[in-house]
Amino acid sequence: MRRREFITLISAVVAAWPLGASAQLAKGPIRIGLLPFGSPSNAYDQSLVDAFRSGLRQAGLIEGRDIVLDIVWTTGSDADTDKAVTDLIHRGAELLVPTGSTASVAAKRHTSTIPIVFVSVGNPVAMGLVENLAHPGGNATGFSDIFSDLSAKLVQFGKVVNKQDTIGYLWHTA
């Protein structure tokens, strides 16, 4: 799955979470605080935000009516990210969507009540974002890129085994 398609999928999940919980309340639009990493002037970074918006539209959500998307770009520094999270909370974000480990940890550090759907973090358990992968607990859940860590282990495994027929056997029987 390409990254852009993944971001679109995430936006559908994000869209469903707060609306399902507050469907009976019939209040104004849900304010989503999006913390993308990068710069709005970078075409690739902006394309990920556009994909997120597209996913929200595909889920049937209209900006201004159903949701308000409040975007604060981050550079990855702790001070910058802390300020971005604080600003979103003060502006009334009802859901935080941080991208990357730094923004996700900052969001978790600043709130235990606002739902957090993190995107692309290394190991959410080790970072203290969730209790475990099967049952996150708390106010945070999301998507991890922990499998990228596993791919390095598979390469190490291949180097240790280093026998063509053994590798072939493992590959064909898996």
Image (cartoon, rainbow, N blue to C red):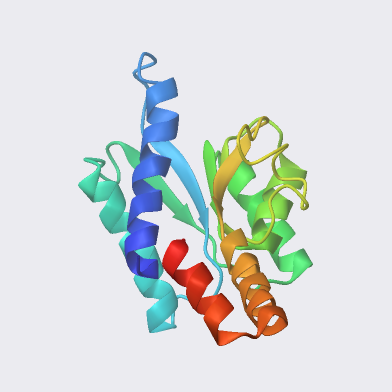
Quarter of the rendering containing residue 116: top right
> Residue at image x 72%, y 80%?
160
What residue appears at the point 52 percent right and 39 percent down from the top-left corner? 95
Percent of width and height locating residue 62: 24, 43
Residue 30 appears at what percent x and percent y? Answer: 41, 35
* Residue 70 relative to residue 90: left or right: left
> Is 69 drawn above or below residue 161 in the view shown?
above
Look at the image and tell me whether residue 12 can be seen. Answer: yes
Q: Which quarter of the rendered picture does the N terminus lie within?
A: bottom left
- Percent of width and height locating residue 25: 39, 15
| 11 relative to 110 in the view: left or right | left
* Foreground of the two, 81 or 10: 10
> Residue at the location (61% across, 63% down)?
100
Q: As rendered, which of 144 and 109 lies closer to the eye? A: 144
Q: Work out whether residue 168 or residue 120 is closer to the camera in this orientation and state it.
A: 168
In this picture, residue 69 sits left or right of residue 122: left
* Snapshot quadrant of residue 16: top left
Figure check: 30 above or below 170 = above
**Against 126, is 132 above or below?**
above
Q: How many marks?
A: 0
Residue 39 is situated, as x and y percent measured from the top left of the image, at 51, 77
Decide if residue 117 is in sight here. Answer: no
Does 20 sit above or below residue 171? above
